[in-house]
Structure formats: C-alpha cells, structure tokens
Amino acid sequence: MFLKKIEVETIRRCGADKTKIRFRTRPSTDISELLPYLNATYPDSIYYAKKPSLELKKDDAVILLESEAIVLNELSNTTQGIKLIDWVKEEINRVYKNKDQIEPDYTSKENLSVPELYKNLPQLNCSECGEVTCLAFATKFVKGEYELEACSPLFTDDYQGIRERLEDYI
C-alpha cells in the first residue's frame, strides 16, 4: 500500500459558500509522483505543472491534490468529507498499484491560474457575476463555468486596462 492514511488537519467553512465546508488534510506519503498518473486517469481533472497539483471533482466537491496536502472543498457535511478522504486514499493506492499500465499525462491544462486571475480582477466582491466573492468567480472562471463578461465591473472605463490585459492573456 502506497498511501497508508490521510490525516485531517483542519475543517473550516468555505470562503465562497458559507453553507459548505472544507477539509485540509495531509497524506502520510508525498503523492506528487502520482499526479501525472491521476491526471491520465481523470480526463476532466486540471493538472498544474508549475506547482505540481491536480484538481478534480467528485460528488459536487472539488478536490485539490498537492504533494503533501489534499484539500476537499465545497463539502455538504463532515460525513461527505470523511467518505471522500477514503475514496481519495483508495484511488491513489489503485493508481499506484496500476501505474505500470497507465501512461502518465504531464499535460498542464492551466492557461490562467485562479490566483493570477484573482489578482487581476477588480476585487470589489460586488456579486454582479452571481458569486459571493471575486475569488469564487475566479475559481469558476478557470474551470470554464463563466465568461469574462460575467464580471461587469471589468467592462467599465475604470478597469479597461485590466480587462484588455486579461483578454490578451486568455
């Protein structure tokens, strides 16, 4: 068994949706070597090569796998979090066991990272896009759930330069 346990470090409310919670956990083993194999296994995942990490969805939760941390976001309750921790552990061990039959995928699907987009948004938290915060908008934009036009302040004269820079980037 590659990964023996995943230890919960913190449980907090999600910043974007206060009705949801997030778990920050620590795997017993550095999992970075498996991220390209997991990327190949989950075609809808988002692999970030610069800071090796992988983001995937399961049961409406967003799971971020990093070398020495696993963060589960948008959880409905602690029971869901515990079940997802078990699922993540099983999947990591399954992929490790079968990695000789999996072609690793080192393709980074990042064009624009959440932090990069966020720092270039007006950061007004105006909710005109339908999200509570600009960070929530940035997260969903990067996942392809929004177009830039959803952020109406970007399309005012005050933010024209920022908007043009973002349009060039994406």
Image (cartoon, rainbow, N blue to C red):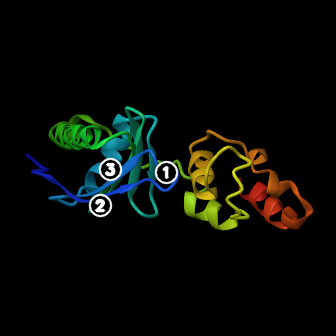
Q: Which of 92 and 139 is in front in this view?
A: 139
Q: Nearer the viewer, residue 43 or 56?
A: 56
Picture quadrant of residue 147: top right
Picture quadrant of residue 59: top left
Q: Residues within 10 Å of mark 1 (few under 14, many from 20)?
A: some
What distance separates the C-alpha of mark 2 from that of mark 1? 16 Å
Among the two numbered marks 1 and 3 on one chain, the one whose residue lies closer to the N terminus:
3
The extreme front residue here reads: 19
Q: What element does badge 2 sit on?
A: loop
- Looking at the rendered structure, the kind of residue marked 2 is Ser
Picture quadrant of residue 29: bottom left
Dots 1 and 3: beta carbons under 8 Å? no
What distance separates the C-alpha of mark 2 from that of mark 3? 8 Å
Q: Residues within 10 Å of mark 2 (few under 14, many from 20)?
A: some
Q: Which residue is drawn at 26% across and 62% down?
A: 68
Q: Residue at x 64, y 67 (%)?
A: 119
What residue does disc 1 label?
108
In the rendered structure, the answer to whether residue 153 lies left or right of residue 134 reads right
> Which numbered disc covers residue 129?
none
What residue does disc 3 label?
35
Q: Is residue 64 visible?
A: no
- Looking at the rendered structure, the kind of residue marked 3 is Leu
Among the two numbered marks 2 and 3 on one chain, the one whose residue lies closer to the N terminus:
3
- Looking at the rendered structure, the kind of residue marked 1 is Ser
Q: How crowded is mark 3: few (under 14 residues within 10 Å), some or many (20 or more)?
A: many
Q: Can residue 107 be seen in this view?
A: yes
What residue does disc 2 label?
67
x and y percentages locating residue 164 in the rendered image: 83, 60
Q: What element does badge 1 sit on?
A: loop
Q: Which residue is drawn at 75% across and 51% down?
A: 151
